[in-house]
Image: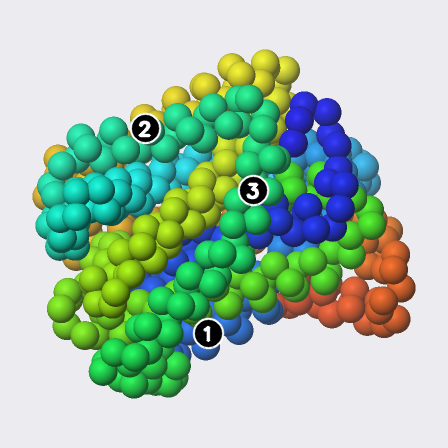
């Protein structure tokens, strides 16, 4: 979205870009495996509930913060602190560190996200070879080969990061994000077809019971933290990304409804991913858990019906594009914040941030080979990093962001975002007060409770 601060010409353009960045591996790869780790239906219910009571209010808050300051997170914080009452300045000084913290989070998340995107690339290449040579596709061989070859993962990760870097450096990410958004309907169709196929497996009733029947006794002390972290992750909230998105958002877009739509669509995609994956996991061909779950289970389905490989190929292309859209959003957030605070040339900022991400990525890329011996409470390095960032770092960042929006952004600016330009909604006052209530009395207590329970479970 350019060096100057333009706005998306149309509402539709914004939706495509926002959804293109929110959809991603979080929905298809991460959601099913954390649901399985947390015992199924009760966790799904908790997750959906949290999407609307904590994720959506914060998503709306970030978009408003970005649009009303026309800045990314770091400069937005500077602006709202400068505008605030003088004596508050010392008190809220620490908020400045939030910007830095969120950007570091973006960088580390991009690093391991790139590793998983590399896995997707590997499957794509294997499916292409299969299609060209007519040889059968070997799902378990593909996965074990990948996991055993750390340097192959490093190579695939660097290919992915290079693509992201070139797109962001050339400043064409807006176009690409939109293109990715356009692919989403196709992705949804493929996902639905594959979900229906999965539902025809004999294991489907048992899988649906697992996914949808809430057995609360299966939740653990860590489940709330995992649900909270995943809600923020999947909606791309707490990274400052939606602040950057908001800064490009035209005044004509009614943010509360935009937030609701993005949150609803994102949750549907995750639920369908669950419907697609669980019958496969329970069929017992591939006992699958942890980060490998999607990659171990899904290809089994492709071999089970005629034309399945073609579907598989289409699915992995869409998945790759979704991962690309999200990665572009992450790098763009780092770079635009970087450039707003320090005057660095775009290309230099992009290559520098991309290079640092690559260095970070070495750890997760080598987690199943060189660092195979790493074990933290039964978790490998990749899963440990993922949990540390998403279940701990992200809720803290999101909590601080909510405080900035709540206490530092002026009421006038917040209220203005709730005045509906299309006067589609009449009760804007009411929506505004519900939103403030949610930010103040729902988001903070739940996030603090989630962190406290996680801490307790560690002790
Ligand atoms: N929301 C993305 C997903 O679900 C991940 C992401 C987080 C992307 C933060 C951009 C910024 O995969």
**Image: 384 above or below 98:** below
Q: Picture quarter containing residue 193?
A: bottom left
Location of mark 3 (residue): 179
Q: Secondary structure at mark 3?
A: helix
- Is 458 left or right of 26, judged from the image as shown? left
Quadrant of the snapshot with the C terminus: bottom left
Q: Earlier in the sequence, mark 2 or mark 3?
A: 2
Q: CA distance from mark 1 to mark 2?
A: 36 Å
Location of mark 1 (residue): 46
Q: Is mark 1 within 8 Å of ligand 1?
A: no
Q: Nearer the viewer, residue 318 or 386?
A: 318
Q: Residue at x 36, y 33 (%)?
A: 160
Q: Earlier in the sequence, mark 1 or mark 3?
A: 1
User: Marks 1 and 3: which is nearer the front?
Assistant: 3
Q: Residue at x 16, y 52 (%)?
A: 137
The disc placed on residue 158 is: 2
């Amino acid at each position: 979205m350019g060096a100057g601060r333009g706005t998306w010409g149309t509402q539709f353009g914004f939706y495509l870009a926002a959804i293109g960045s929110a959809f991603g591996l979080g929905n298809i790869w991460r959601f099913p495996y954390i649901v399985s780790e947390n015992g199924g239906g009760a966790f799904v219910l908790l997750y959906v509930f949290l999407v609307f009571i904590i994720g959506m209010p914060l998503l709306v808050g970030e978009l408003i913060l970005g649009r009303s300051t026309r800045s990314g997170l770091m400069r937005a914080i500077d602006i709202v602190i400068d505008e605030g009452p003088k004596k508050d300045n010392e008190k809220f000084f620490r908020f400045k560190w939030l910007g830095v913290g969120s950007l570091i989070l973006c960088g580390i998340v991009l690093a391991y996200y790139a590793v998983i995107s590399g896995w997707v690339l590997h499957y794509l290449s294997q499916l292409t070879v299969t299609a060209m040579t007519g040889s059968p596709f070997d799902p378990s061989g593909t996965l074990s080969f990948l996991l055993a070859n750390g340097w192959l993962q490093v190579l695939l990760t660097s290919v992915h990061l290079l693509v992201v870097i070139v797109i962001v450096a050339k400043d064409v990410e807006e176009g690409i994000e939109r293109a990715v958004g356009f692919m989403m309907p196709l992705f949804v169709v493929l996902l639905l077809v594959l979900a229906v196929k999965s539902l025809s497996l004999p294991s489907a009733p048992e899988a649906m019971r697992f996914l949808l029947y809430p057995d609360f006794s299966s939740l653990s002390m860590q489940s709330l933290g995992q649900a909270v972290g995943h809600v923020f992750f999947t909606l791309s909230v707490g990274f400052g990304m939606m602040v950057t998105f908001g800064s490009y958002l035209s005044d004509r877009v009614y943010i509360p409804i935009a937030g609701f739509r993005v949150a609803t669509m994102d949750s549907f995609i995750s639920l369908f991913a669950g419907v697609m994956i669980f019958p496969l996991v329970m069929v017992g061909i591939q006992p699958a858990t942890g980060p490998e779950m999607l990659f171990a289970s899904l290809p089994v389905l492709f071999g089970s019906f005629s034309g399945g490989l073609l579907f598989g190929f289409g699915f992995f292309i869409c998945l790759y594009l979704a991962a690309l859209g999200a990665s572009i959003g992450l790098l763009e957030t780092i770079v635009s914040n970087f450039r707003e605070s320090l005057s660095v040339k775009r290309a230099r900022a992009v290559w520098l941030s991309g290079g640092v991400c690559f260095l970070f990525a070495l750890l997760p890329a080598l987690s199943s080979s060189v660092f195979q011996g790493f074990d933290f409470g039964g978790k490998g390095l990749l899963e440990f990093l993922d949990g540390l960032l998403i279940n701990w770092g992200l809720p803290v960042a999101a909590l601080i962001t909510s405080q900035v929006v709540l206490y530092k952004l002026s009421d006038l600016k917040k209220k203005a975002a709730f005045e509906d330009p299309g006067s589609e909604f009449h009760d804007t006052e009411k929506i505004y007060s519900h939103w403030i209530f949610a930010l103040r009395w729902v988001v903070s207590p739940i996030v603090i409770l989630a962190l406290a329970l996680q801490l307790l479970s560690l002790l």
